[in-house]
Image (spheres, grey):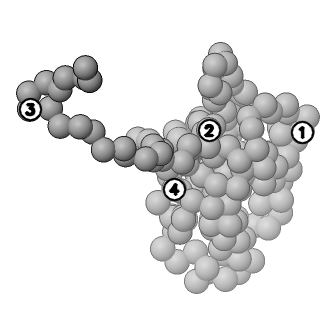
Amino acid sequence: QGRQRRRGAEPQADAGPLSLAPAMPPSVLCTGLPQQTVLAWQLAGEAPSSLVIRVGITQLADQALRHAPPRPSELEHAIDLVEEALTGLPHSWPAGALLQPAGLFDLMLPHLGDLGRSAVEDLFQRLASWSLGHPSAAQGLPQDCMFIAAALLLRELTHHLSFETLAPNAG
């Protein structure tokens, strides 16, 4: 005649629709190395992908940034080197992907106010102001060429490869 209930088992109340956390956008791991920068990502159901950018943080510091503060012409030369390396690079990550800096980028991550591209741009603008003769702009920042190269390279990557947001560093 009807279903029998096991002893001690209570009927389950309808919990309603499942509450799922919003899906995180995919992240592109961006590893800053001395002589190159490597982007790596994997989309659901696809094989891992990577892209090597032929400019690295140490290389950029050695080739373009010879003074602290850097001269404006040194910053321009460094930007030119990065833009040349980025020209024509294909990318296949989806719009809205997060850039997750790692490796030598760890030098500058603690100095970002937040994880938006505007924070990266603000940091670079402080360094540019320092190079134009405003020492107070760099107050509290490391004042060495490796730090400047990391900040400049990350700025160019976020700008030219259309990353609006950084992912928190997993390390």
Query: Marks 3 and 1, how far apart in space?
Result: 69 Å
Give the camera-side residue of 53 and 165: 165
Q: Mark 2: which secondary structure?
A: loop
Amino acid at pointer 4: Leu
Which residue is identified by label 1? 87
Q: Nearer the viewer, mark 3 or mark 2?
A: 3
User: Closer to us: mark 4 or mark 2?
Assistant: 2
Estimate the x, y position of residue 56 in percent, counting from the top left.
67, 38
- Residue at image coords 68%, 66%: 118
How far separated are the C-alphas under marks 4 and 2? 20 Å
Label 1 or label 2, whichever lies nearer to me, is 2
In the structure shown, which secondary structural element does the residue marked by tag 4 occupy? Answer: helix
Between the C-alphas of marks 1 and 2, the distance is 24 Å
Q: Which numbered disc, 3 or 1, marks the residue that appears first in the sequence?
A: 3
Tell me which corner region of the image, top left, top right, bottom left or bottom right, holds residue 81.
top right
Amino acid type, label 3: Gly
Say which of marks 3 and 4 sits in front: 3
Question: Dot 1 lies on which element?
Answer: loop
Report the disc number at residue 26: 2
* Residue 32 shown left or right of residue 95 in the figure: left
Tell me which label, 1 or 2, sits earlier in the chain. 2
Residue contact at pointers 3 and 4, CB within 8 angstroms: no
Q: Residue furthest front?
A: 1
Residue labelled with disc 3: 8
Disc 3 packing (10 Å; few <14; some 14–19; many ≥20):
few
Q: CA distance from mark 3 to mark 2?
A: 45 Å
Q: Earlier in the sequence, mark 3 or mark 2?
A: 3
**Residue type highlighted by circle 2:** Pro
Q: Give the distance between the C-alpha atoms of the residues marked 1 and 4, in whole angstroms.
A: 25 Å
Residue corresponding to mark 4 = 109
Furthest-right residue in this view: 88
